[in-house]
Image (spheres, rainbow, N blue to C red):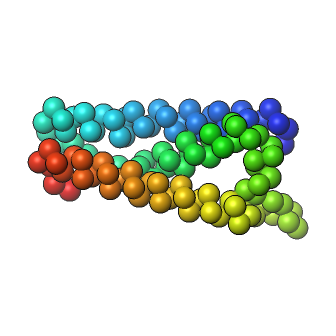
Amino acid sequence: MSELKVRSVGGFLLTIGIAPTYFFAYLPHEAARAHQSGVELYMKADFLIPVSIMFGTFLLLFGKRGKDWIQIEAAGRQKLTAIGWGFTIACFITGIALHEWLKKSIEAFGYRF
């Protein structure tokens, strides 16, 4: 994959991470702040947002070199490197932290999940 394609994928991932942040993190928080009824959290979105933002930013900044740091091709199959696994684990921990922060923040307004 060329440098431009890798950076384009990074930009796309970053974009599809930022847009759901508005709809699935910001809007529910603001709805709870305004004490609207029917405030919901979407756990899958809370996990996918950090993954797409972190991987998108990483690929946008480092391009093909960054892709090679996190992924290798062995015997025709793509595998994560140790750095790739660490990065993936960091993404999921960030997703859990985002979900728990949103949950606690919205519960502070009197909502229960």
Pick the quarter of the image with the C terminus: bottom left
The residue under the point 85% across, 66% down is 74
Q: Quadrant of the N terminus?
A: top right
**In the picture provided, is 49 more to the left or to the right than 111?**
right
* Total number of numbered discs in the rendering: 0
In the shown orientation, is residue 110 left or right of residue 45? left
**Nearer to me, 82 or 76:** 82
Q: Measured from the top left, where is residue 28 in percent x and y?
A: 27, 39
Position of residue 39 in the picture relative to residue 94 (left or right) = left
Q: Is residue 9 visible?
A: no
In the image, farthest residue toward the right: 75
Name the residue nearer the viewer: 38 or 13: 13
Q: Answer above or below: position of 25 versus 34.
A: below
Q: Is residue 10 left or right of residue 52?
A: right
- Residue 40 appears in view: yes
- The image quarter in which residue 77 lies: bottom right
Q: Position of residue 24 (x, y in %)?
A: 36, 40
Is 10 located above or below residue 69 in the figure? above
Name the residue nearer the viewer: 80 or 37: 80
Residue 41 pos. (x, y %): 30, 48
Picture quadrant where residue 3 is located: top right
The x, y position of residue 63, in whole percent, is: 76, 40
Q: Residue at 37% across / 35% down in the picture?
A: 23
